[in-house]
Amino acid sequence: MFARVLWRLLRGNSGRLSVALVALISGSAVISALLNLQLDVERRLAQEFRTLGANLLIAPASGGQFADSGGAAATLMDEQGAMTAVAALSQSDVAAAAPFLYLRARAGGTQTVVAGTHLRELQKLEPSWKINGDWREPEDNSGRCIVGQAAARILHATPGSELTLNYLGRAAKVRVLGIVESGAEQDSQVFVELPVAQTLAGTPHQIGLVQLSVNSAPQAMAIIEAQLRAALPGAEVMPIRQVTDAEVRLLGRIRLLIASMVILILVLTALCVLATMAALAMERREDVGLMKALGGPISRIVALFLAEVSVLGAVGGLIGCLAGVALSIWMGRRVFGAAISPRWEILPLTVALMVAVALAGALPLRLLGRVKPAAILRGE
Amino acid sequence: MFARLVGESFARNPRRKILTAAALVVGMAVATATLTIALEVGDRLAEEFRSLGANLVVTPQSDTLPVEIGGVDFRPVDEGAYLHESDLGKLKTIFWRHHILGFTPFLDVPVSIAADGEKTPARTTLIGTWYQHDVPVPDDAPFRTGAASTHPWWKLKEGRWFADGAEECVLGATFAAKHAGEISIGSSLRIDATTSETSEKQTAATLTVVGIVSTGGAEDNAILAPLSVAQALSGHPGELRQLFVSALTKPADALAERDPKTMTPTEYDKWFCSPYISSISFQITSVLPGTDVRAIRRVADTEGRVLTRVGTLLWIVTLAALIAAGLAVAATSATTVIERRSEVGIMKAIGATNALVAGIFLAEQLMLAVIGGLLGYVLGTGLARVLGSSVFGSPASPRIVLLPVVLGLASLVAIAGSLIPLRRAARFDPAPILRGE
């Protein structure tokens, strides 16, 4: 009986109910899209900040962190030990990790800083650098280098030309792959593959520094630091505060900004749906008046209405949520150039919210129970 | 007659209008608040990005290469070219001078240090810089700048900063820890600088340690002293090696990437008068001839990308807010019109044309929209102030430009919301409506 009346109500009133349904669908679409975006935005922005380059250094404890490996006093660390410790970290938190060995070598007649590293990792470590030439090159030869633009100007290096590096009587010939522009001190350095620098320095399997670009959320950073310290007791693990401080601060600001805007819109959308449902409820006042005049329980009418709006809320919430997921995928493409992975835990949340708001809309109907039926039936 | 009809209709039975009015006020308040924030966020975030420090570096054009690892120059002091300290005030005379937030000169001197009574000297680098320094600006008040404004992540662990121009120094944290036994705050250090590997000329200074600083960078292994001390030690009075500039810039777009030489005069004017990092560095080069001004790509690139991303994101969120606000208003005005179908029936029964009925209703909605929009604007401006101060620490300034926008938007959605039910009402036969069917 109840179900039949409910079905008749839903079918018979399709015009009025469709207004409410549109409000519910658009409301839940906006809510689910924004929630989805909000959950993903921080991860995406943290990735954007990785263009800042390294934010963590591992250096031998006793030496200067950028020790020139040539001098007798210079302290180095074992390449394999350090890189094993880095490889043991959670890989999703590490954007890039490159070992470095610095030499003050001569190229031609000019003293220059030669940095031995893995060029492939260097590219991941410094995505902001502008390169004239190409990072990629068939794997076979290690005799390649990348030259900073200031160094290139003085050494007359162009992509494809050759450089001869001299250090303590040893020499190495490298071919220039590309010229990089960093705007920082790296503009005056020459980057070669690590084995070349190690041979040149006469310190095989030794490195002076590891630069890491890692997830800089304070908790993740603390875990990474602790893991590295435990694995490498002889080394110093230093966050680059210029980068980490600014990043945490900026991400915090942006997160707060987006969250406050999203909350504002959520409240507005919920209010909008509530108002529509309240208006829908007010249309039942004559039914309530009639029922009261007949001496019947108004709870029957309220129950019918509640059942009606729950069905509406569930249907609207579901359709809207699907639309919202599609919307958030579009937003992700528009903002970050990559689709946002939908979070399905939002679906029950949004549907529940919609049903709750729709039910809350029935409150004024409850209050009508107190007034005199005659006034309602007269249309006042 | 029409005006009276509208007035009567508006004044009577206020309960029915409250819902629409409330929706208008809330919707427009949110629209105003989000628009205000969206308009302001670019500038505010660009300021926040200055916590990353300098985004431009000025170096002399020279024929020797800086031998620089980890921010410390290992070149002997008599090699390479220098910048002149007396020229720095000119930075505050360029077109975008108000966008130059600060600049800090650096002069690194390799030194050996001995504490009182210590026999073996320690070798390190003395970094000459400004912490807070008043730079004379031509035709203007002096500009106070230095590491305090360009290197905000430098944190003093103990003691205080050196006074500008005094014979004092601050130790890097790692250096201080390594020499904890011999050197502490208050001890005086004898500093010897060998100006060249070959020459016998030696300069020396005696500095008092006044503090210990932690920078999280290469400076932790060095000692920091006033620029004038480093100049005296290196034998280069009034000169410096590098200048870090922190400038407020606009994210680069297609115009900013282009070579100014290939631009038409109008494009060039537009480029010159936009605070792009490329135009600011061009203007610095023109007041400091013989220098290389480079954008630090890590900082500039990240800033540009993040600002563009957040800007787009915020506009999309604002769009969502506008749509939600529009829907709220449209939905409520639709329901109020539906509720008043019996009024429409009576009016039509006594001979009103469809146009007259629609006119009365729309005029009423417009009045509501103006009142609701005004209240919403006031409320939204307040909301933006609160939001601004909670997110950025200072309230967002109200934008009067938004008032007509918000009023127009309110009228648009209120009318759009009532049009559909009005069109349906026009098709009704008055008789069944009046019978309540």
Image (cartoon, coloured by chain):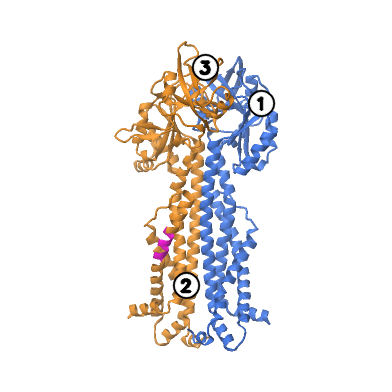
Chain colours: A blue, B orange
Q: Tell us which disc is closer to us: 2 or 3.
A: 2
Q: Say yes or no: labels 2 and 1 on the same chain.
A: no
Q: Residues within 10 Å of mark 1 (few under 14, many from 20)?
A: many
Q: Residue at x 61, y 14 (%)?
A: A169
Judging by the rendered image, the residue that carries numbered circle 3 is A109
Query: Does residue B313 appear in this view?
Result: yes
Amino acid beneath label 3: Gly
Amino acid beneath label 2: Leu
Q: Work out whether B212 lies above or below B424.
A: above
Left or right of residue B49, residue B290 in this image = left
Query: Does residue A176 appear in this view?
Result: no
Left or right of residue A255, residue B278 in this image = left
Q: Which one is nearer the viewer's eye here, A290 or A100?
A: A290
Locate residue B141, reporting x and y percent. Answer: 32, 36
Q: Earlier in the sequence, mark 3 or mark 1?
A: 1
B378 part of magenta stretch: yes
Label 3 sits on a secondary structure element that is loop
Q: Which residues are magenta?
A: B373-381
A4 part of magenta stretch: no
**In 3D space, how far apart are the residues under numbered discs 2 and 3 (Cα atoms)?**
83 Å
Q: Work out whether A285 lies above or below A243.
A: below
Q: Say yes or no: labels 3 and 1 on the same chain.
A: yes
Judging by the rendered image, the residue that carries numbered circle 2 is B19
Q: Residue at x 62, y 37 (%)?
A: A96
Label 2 sits on a secondary structure element that is helix
Judging by the rendered image, the residue that carries numbered circle 1 is A77
Residue at the top extreme of this rendering:
B200
